Image (cartoon, rainbow, N blue to C red):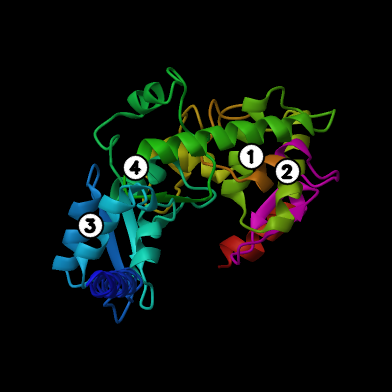
């Protein structure tokens, strides 16, 4: 009798163990089952969302087949459940449930590019920030002065102080984050570039280098010309000549500029018009890139004092006024 009871008990134990093993294997298979996706899917984890809420939502959307398996995991193996982070994530076909949960607890959020071109103005940069999708537009209704105060630069004129580049942002970031990144980059790069400056410059401070770089940036998009234009500006200042660069007229005109400069515009006395004022303008007129900054503090030696656009993005450089006038006739008046 005892032997029969022992045998029965062993059978129950073996069957129970087999059932438990089978149940565990099935549970694991549900955790490792591929997501029900035929193409990539963008999924947003809301701020403060709990694990059970997210897996339930994923099941309701048809991405997961068995939310119970993950809810059970959170109960019996809480250390195996990642702490979910808010943000957008890209779910891919072939990814299984455990891989997805690891992704939702990682920093691998979907990011978006935002490109500030070299030579843009701060106004253009702000307009782009105000229309960037998925970005929190905290500064949209602020004045430039209020923006600079928010960035701990109260009283600083913003033009020129933001480094043009491609920045990446993700859901939850604001325009302030990008502005702060861009500002700090410009400050660091300007400091580095100024430390490598030539000894005999006609500019006396990093800020004047920033102003000069903005003129160079607006004058040419041809990399090989930047240092030569810087050299022309340097020699003109050394000889007491005015810089006479058209982009300063345009910047001084502001909203009145409609694509054409008249003789009256050239003669108009604005703080920026280098046909009227001596030396450089009071502030930058654009956001210069690193190459323009480096050119401003390392002008190319030479004898040229004039340049005129060829109409193809490059310039003709001249040593004498006569040569320059001939070039103007060739490239501007005849055209």
Q: Is residue 261 above or below residue 243?
A: below
Would you say residue 51 sits in the magenta stretch? no
Residue that sits furthest to the front in the current view = 1
Q: Earlier in the sequence, mark 3 or mark 2?
A: 3
| Pointer 1 local density, CA inside 10 Å: few below 14, some 14–19, many at least 20 | many
Task: Name the mark on residue 295.
Answer: 2
Q: CA distance from mark 2 to mark 4?
A: 30 Å
Q: Earlier in the sequence, mark 3 or mark 4?
A: 3
Nearer mark to the viewer, of 3 and 2? 3
Residue at the (38%, 73%) spot, across then down: 95
Query: What element does badge 2 sit on?
Result: helix
* Quarter of the rendering containing residue 256: top left
Residue 117 lies left or right of residue 147; in this view the side is right
Q: Can you tell which mark lies on residue 257?
A: none
Assess whether mark 2 and mark 1 are in contact (beta carbons under 8 angstroms).
Answer: yes
* Alpha carbon separation for disc pair 3 and 2: 61 Å
- Determine which residue is flagged by label 4: 256
Q: Is residue 279 visible?
A: no
Report the side of 259 relative to 274 (left or right). left
Report, in whole angstroms, how far the alpha carbon at label 1 lies from the one at label 2: 7 Å
Q: Nearer the viewer, residue 320 or 157?
A: 157
* Picture coordinates of residue 121, whole percent (x, y): 45, 42
Q: Which image quadrant: the C terminus?
A: bottom right
Q: Tell me whether circle 2 and circle 4 mark residues in contact (CB < 8 Å).
A: no
Residue to which mark 1 is pinned: 213
Are the residues at dot 1 and dot 3 in contact (C-beta closer than 8 Å)? no
- N-terminal label among 1 and 3: 3
The magenta segment is 295-323
- Residue reaching furthest to the top: 155
> Where does label 3 land, which residue?
71
């Amino acid at each position: 009798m005892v032997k029969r009871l022992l045998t029965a008990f062993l059978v129950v134990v073996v069957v129970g163990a087999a059932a438990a093993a089978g149940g565990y294997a099935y549970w694991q298979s549900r955790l490792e089952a591929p997501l029900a996706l035929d193409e990539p899917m963008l999924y947003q984890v809301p701020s403060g969302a709990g694990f059970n809420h997210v897996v339930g939502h994923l099941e309701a959307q048809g991405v997961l087949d068995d939310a119970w398996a993950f809810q059970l995991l959170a109960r019996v193996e809480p250390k195996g459940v990642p702490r979910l982070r808010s943000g957008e994530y890209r779910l891919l076909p072939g990814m299984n449930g455990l891989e997805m949960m690891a992704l939702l607890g990682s920093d691998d959020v979907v990011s978006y590019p935002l490109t500030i071109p070299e030579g843009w103005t701060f106004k253009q940069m702000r307009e782009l920030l105000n229309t960037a999708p998925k970005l929190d537009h905290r500064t949209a209704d602020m004045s430039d002065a209020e923006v600079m105060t928010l960035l701990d630069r109260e009283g600083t004129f913003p033009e020129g102080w933001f480094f043009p580049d491609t920045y990446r942002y993700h859901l939850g970031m604001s325009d302030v984050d990008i502005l702060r990144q861009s500002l700090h980059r410009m400050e660091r790069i300007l400091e580095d570039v100024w430390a490598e400056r030539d000894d005999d410059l006609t500019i006396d401070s990093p800020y004047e280098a920033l102003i000069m770089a903005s003129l160079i940036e607006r004058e040419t998009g041809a990399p090989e010309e930047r240092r030569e234009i810087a050299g022309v500006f340097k020699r003109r200042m050394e000889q007491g000549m005015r810089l006479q660069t058209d982009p300063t007229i345009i910047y001084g005109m502001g909203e009145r500029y409609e694509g054409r400069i008249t003789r009256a515009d050239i003669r108009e006395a604005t703080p920026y018009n280098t046909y009227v004022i001596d030396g450089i303008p009071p502030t930058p007129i654009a956001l210069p890139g690193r190459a323009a900054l480096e050119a401003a503090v390392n002008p190319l030696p030479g004898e040229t004092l004039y340049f005129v656009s060829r109409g193809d993005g490059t310039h003709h450089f001249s040593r004498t006024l006569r040569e320059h006038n001939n070039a103007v006739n060739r490239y501007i008046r005849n055209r």
